[in-house]
Image: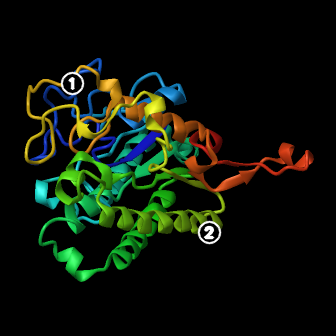
Amino acid sequence: CYFIFGDSLVDSGNNNGLSTSARVKYPPYGIDFPAGPTGRFTNGKTVADIITELLGLKDYIQPFATVTESEIINGVNYASGSSGIRDEAGRNLGTHVGFNQQLNNHKITISSLTKTLKDSTAAHLNKCLYTVGMGSNDYINDYFLPRSATSTQYTPDQFAGVLIDQYSKQIRTLHDAGARKIALFGLGAISCTPNSIVLFGKNGTCAERITGAVQLFNVRLKSLVDQLNKELTDSKVIYINSTGTLGRYPNKLGFKVFKSSCCRVNNVGLCNPSSTACPNRNEFIFWDGFHPTEAMNKLTAARAFHAADPSDAYPFVCDTIAITTASKRFSSLSLLSIL
């Protein structure tokens, strides 16, 4: 079973019925997804969808907004576009389901599960995979907004500390609810999205001040993973590196367009309804002003699941076979390895 917490990168329809600008149940979104537009913020599958396939689960994990009691045994997707670690994130776009509320929704799910599984509920939850990807909107749709009160209240270093302090409490709440196999996705290259380049970049380059802020957060997140593993000894917690997926030579992976969106976007950075999408979508990293294409999501999910490179995930584990040959080799704990 698989439980998904996050924002628009893995939202599969929880925002469809909300009063928000962060809703995408219209074409060209879903142009490459079998069911068409579903509320996924990309042309096809999200990272969570692809991880679901890699786990061997029969169906995609259903959004909390529409999941049935018979489906929750396989897990639930609580992710909501524009949500963040703090409730303030994304309020500029309208209603959303922040991480605190996602955790409350998970409690509702557990209550429903208990009706079916009774005394075996805890054992079931302990075996599930939990992925959490939060923080992007705390920066994009709060800290770096024009005239943001948050940015006047905190330096980037202080803000990273505030986020991690709250994140720590939230992950412990998830652990208290039965999570034992937890993967925390670090912030990706949000400074290099088409939207960030237009608003904050210089001469078409990534926005340096956002890059610095993201690095401060990710460094603290890795330290949080160490702390959680030390204190929650009955659990495995890993950090997934979302910034190094492309490596040094993304063109060798088939990508040719790095700074432009595949669709024509509106003033919010989302695709215009019924606009024409680029035909060569597998060559684009970004689908709209913020979100990756399915092609990029496939790469991210595969790297997270298998950790082909030691930089893909943290912490590192020592390969004992390599030690016997007198040359230490270190690999990362991937999603697969914590199951």
Instruction: Judge depth for marks 2 and 1 and give the one in front.
Output: 1
Q: Which residue is mark 2?
A: 231
Relative to 184, residue 228 above or below:
below
Q: Decide which of tag 2 and tag 1 comes sooner along the chain.
A: 2
* Left or right position of 79 against 263: right
Residue appearing at x 22%, y 31% in the figure: 262
Q: Residues within 10 Å of mark 1 (few under 14, many from 20)?
A: some
Q: Are marks 2 and 1 in contact (CB under 8 Å)?
A: no
**Type of amino acid at the residue the image marks with label 2:** Glu
Q: Position of residue 256 (x, y in %)?
A: 35, 31
Quadrant in the picture for the C terminus: top right
Residue appearing at x 23%, y 82% in the figure: 153
Q: Which residue is mark 1?
A: 278
Label 1, secondary structure: give it: loop
**Type of amino acid at the residue the image marks with label 1:** Cys
Label 2, secondary structure: give it: helix
Marks 2 and 1, Cα distance to the nearest angstrom? 48 Å
Residue appearing at x 57%, y 53% in the figure: 238
Q: Residues within 10 Å of mark 2 (few under 14, many from 20)?
A: few
Between 118 and 308, the one lying in front of the other is 308
Relative to 321, residue 53 above or below:
above
